[in-house]
Amino acid sequence: MDSPPEALPRRTLLKGAVALGGVALLPACGSDDSSAGAIVLEDQRGKKLSLDGPAQRIVTLPMPAASIMIAVDQTAEHLVGIHDASWAAAKQSILGTMFPQVLEVPHDVGTQDFAPNVEGILALEPDIVVQWASQGDEIIQPLENADLKVLGVNYGTIEDVGTWFSMFSTALGQPERGRAMATRLDADRLAAEAVAAKQTGRGPRVLYFLRFSEGMEVQGAGTFNEEYVRLVGAENVSSEVEGLAKVDLEQVLDWDPDVIVLGNFDAAMPGDIYGDRRWRDVAAVKDKRVYRAPLGGYRWDPPSHESPLMWTWLSQIAFPDGTDGGLRDKIVDDYKYFYGHTPTQSEIDTILWKDANGGSADYDQFSA
């Protein structure tokens, strides 16, 4: 599994009064000057770039960018280069099933640390290159020195996802698509808040592992993961640490979480914890409440267009009521909207890790 470029920053899920619908409408993020046939974009560095028309050839380096670009475009045909981590994620997930052509896209455009393969990217003749703006100029300047048009992006909040919708859809000549996606995301958040408001009693104490197998890492105070744990009405037990933090078993035993969620950045599964006697006294283990987060067109646990599916899933994990909370129907609806694909019941089972999670409490609620 690939790893995220950095610990998610300490920012609120939505800043101040800026609603997601507004994010996609921000003029700084992009405008389509149709009278001149040109498209003018402003990236998350505040730098402007112009295109003669909708981008036809796009290279993406940030991990979520390929999936989000596909969701905006509803096709992979404009991707001519993606990072190897994005390619691996597509191969491991349903994205490669929905868009098999993405597995044929060159994926040697950068190193594991996102240093660009400038010569290789130039050979792809891209109209734009999407690259991290938050990792320093040294991974952007070589691209700009080669006269490539670089869209610098930041990441870590739902606000950033809304901004990506705006930038990507504008670059593709489909600004209305980005606005519609942002409005949908905003409505999904309001729906999640409404569900959480109906919960009674103390919510479970949840511990999310970004990584587990090769050194345990949790998401503490100020992270996106903490935000959505709280969003559904639960408590993040690792909130006493800041950001991304390494922990040991002693610390986990002290926290004694009610629920453990394993992220999709390594291969750990619930059975790995259930089978380790050192964990037997943890409440989540005793009660069989350890779960692997779903893996769809992109990982559900970090910020993306599929984050509302994570909110629905986690809400049902935290407050099981014998139903799936409409999750399976929402997967079908969202995948038709984002990808033009109607997933089969078997594909939904795969997304939800039904086999790996089948031995955990209340997971039958997600059965077809």
Image: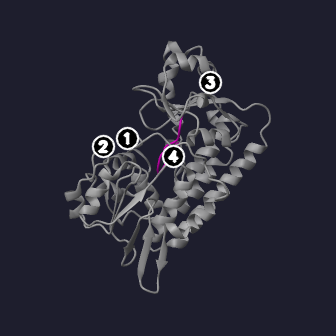
Disc with the residue nearer the chain's start (4 vs 2) = 2
Label 4: element kind:
helix
Instruction: Residue 60 in the image: state x and y as whole percent.
Output: 36, 57
Binning the other alpha carbons within 10 Å of mark 1 as few (below 14), some (14 to 19) or many (20 upward) gives some
Snapshot quadrant of residue 179: bottom right
Helix, strand or loop: magenta stretch: loop
**Which of the two marks, 4 or 2, is nearer to us in this view?**
2
Which mark is on residue 13?
A: none
Q: Rounded to the nearest whole Å, what is the CA distance between mark 4 and mark 1?
A: 26 Å
Which residue is the site of mark 1?
2
In the rendered structure, which amino acid carries the disc numbered 1?
Asp
Q: Rounded to the nearest whole Å, what is the CA distance between mark 3 and mark 1?
A: 26 Å
Disc with the residue nearer the chain's start (3 vs 1) = 1
Q: Rounded to the nearest whole Å, what is the CA distance between mark 1 and mark 2?
A: 8 Å
Which residue is the site of mark 2?
112
In this view, 196 is above or below 121: above
**Are circles 1 and 2 on residues that touch, CB within 8 Å?**
yes
Which mark is on residue 346?
A: 4
